[in-house]
Amino acid sequence: MRFLISLIGLSACACGLEAATKGQVTPDNPTGIYQPGQTVTWNVELSEDKAPAKGEVSFSLRKGGLEELTKGTVELREGKATITGTRNEPGVLTLIVKYKAKDQPERVFQAGAVFAPEKIAASAPPPDDFDAFWKSKIAELDAIPIDAQLEKVDIGDPKIDYYKITMNNIRGTKIYGQLAKPAGQTRLPALLQVQWAGVYPLQREWVVGHARNGWLSLNISSHNLPIDKPDAFYAEKAKTELNDYPGQGNDDREKSYFLRMFLSCRRAVDYLTKNPDWNGKTVVVHGLSQGGYQAIVTAGIHPAVTALAANVPAGCDHTGKKAGRLPGWPAWASRTWQGKDEQKMLAAARYFDAMNFATRTPCAALVGLGLVDQACPPEGVIATCNQLSGPKQIIIMPLADHNGDHKAYDQAFGKFLEAQKKAEK
C-alpha cells in the first residue's frame, strides 16, 4: 500500500473560526504519521486581532476520536503552547483544543496523528451470511429488466452527446441520472460518479467535463427522484419523505434506505458494461463522502469495476465502537435518538459497512482521508483501506477535515483517472 502524504493546508484547522481569532495546531512531524510509542508534539499558535493570544487553552486527547485519554489546560506564552501525546498501538489520536478570548465565543481547533496506519485492523469481520444476503439482493435486482430510457438533450456543444437516463430499480423505484460521451466516439472507458449526502439536483458539468476528457460518463442520483427539478422541489423532499433518510430502515437489512441506493450503483455498472460505446475493459467508480461510500460498495458487489476513487468516504466502520473508535457517518448504530433497538441497528449496519465490502474489492483504489475529519473519522477509513486487496494509494491529509482543503486528493485523482485509461490500452 502507498500512503501518500498531503502537506497542503498545514497552516490551520479551526472549527467555527471567526476573523478576530486566528490559529494553527500542527504536529512536529508534518506527515502526521508516527510509530506506536513515539511521542507527538503539537505546536499551538493563536493570535487575537493580530496580536499573540493571551491566557490558556484547554485540550482533550482522544483515542480513535472516541475514548478520552487525557485532558487539561496549558498556558499560552506569546500566543504559543505545546501539547504532547502518544499511543502504544496502531490507530489515531485526535487533539481538540479550545480557546476563549474575553468577550468572544469559544474557538475550537483540531489536529490528529496516526500510528502505524498500515496495521490498523477491522473492528469486526463481515457477517457469516454477508455474501449470501447480497447475492439474494442482486438476484432480486436482476429479475427486473433494466429498461433504460434515454432522453437526448441539446446542450449547445456538438462535440458532446448528453442524455438524461432512467432505469428500473427494485420494488417499483427508479434510477435517475445523466450520461455524456464524446460525440461520434466508441470504445470508451466508463466512469460512474455517485453522489455525496443530501437531496439536490445533478449538475451537467459533472458528466460533461469527463466526457470532454474521453470518458463514457454516467452520474446517478442517490434517490428515487428526477435530476433537474427546481431547488424548492428537493428542499420539500428533504423536509418530508427524505427527512433523515440515512436513518430510514436502519434496524432492518431488508428495509434500509441504502439497499436500493447500493443496488442503483450495481445497476449503473450493468448499464455501462452493456453500452455499445464501452471499450469492454475499463470501469471506474468515484465519489465524495457518501459517494465514496458507494464507490467502495460498488467495487465490492460488481466484478466489472476495475478501479475506485473515494475521497473522505462515509459508511466505514459501523462497528467501530467495538474497537474503541468513532464509526463513520451516518453513525448507523449510534442513532439512539430514533428510539430504535441499538442492537438491531448494529446488526443491520454490518451488511452495509464499507469495510465489509472492501474485503471483496480487488480492484485498484485511490482513497483520501483527513486526520481531523469528524464526520468520517480517519481510523475507520484507514481500517477499511487495509481490507482492500488490490493496488491502492491512500492520501493522508494531516490537517484536513471533512469539508476542508482536499487539493492533494484532487491532484491525485486526475492522475489516477489518466492512469486507468492508459493501463487498458
Image (spheres, rainbow, N blue to C red):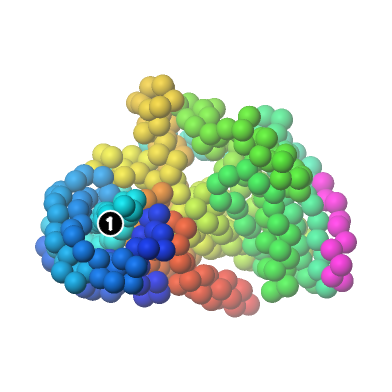
Total numbered badges shown on the rendered structure: 1
Kind of residue at disc 1? Ala
Q: Is residue 137 above or below residue 270?
A: above
Q: Is residue 45 visible?
A: no
Q: Hey, which residue is sitting farthest front in the picture? A: 103
Report whether 334 appears left or right of 294: left
Relative to the observer, which residue lies in front, 25 or 419?
Answer: 25
Magenta stretch containing residue 155, yes or no? yes
Point out the stretch of residues depicted in magenta. Answer: 149-158
How busy is the neighbourhood of tag 1: few (under 14 within 10 Å), some, or many (20 plus)? some
Residue 175, image x, y percentages: 70, 43
Q: Which residue is mark 1?
A: 101
Near-viewer residue (357 or 209): 209
Q: Residue 305, image x and y in percent?
A: 57, 58
Camera-nearest residue between 106 and 197: 106
Question: Residue drawn 40% across and 54% down?
Answer: 16
Residue at left offset 52%, top offset 56% = 288
Direction from residue 317 to residue 155 in the image, left or right: right
At 40% from the left and 39% from the top, the residue drawn is: 331
Residue 391 position in % (x across, y down): 43, 67
Q: Is residue 119 magenta?
A: no
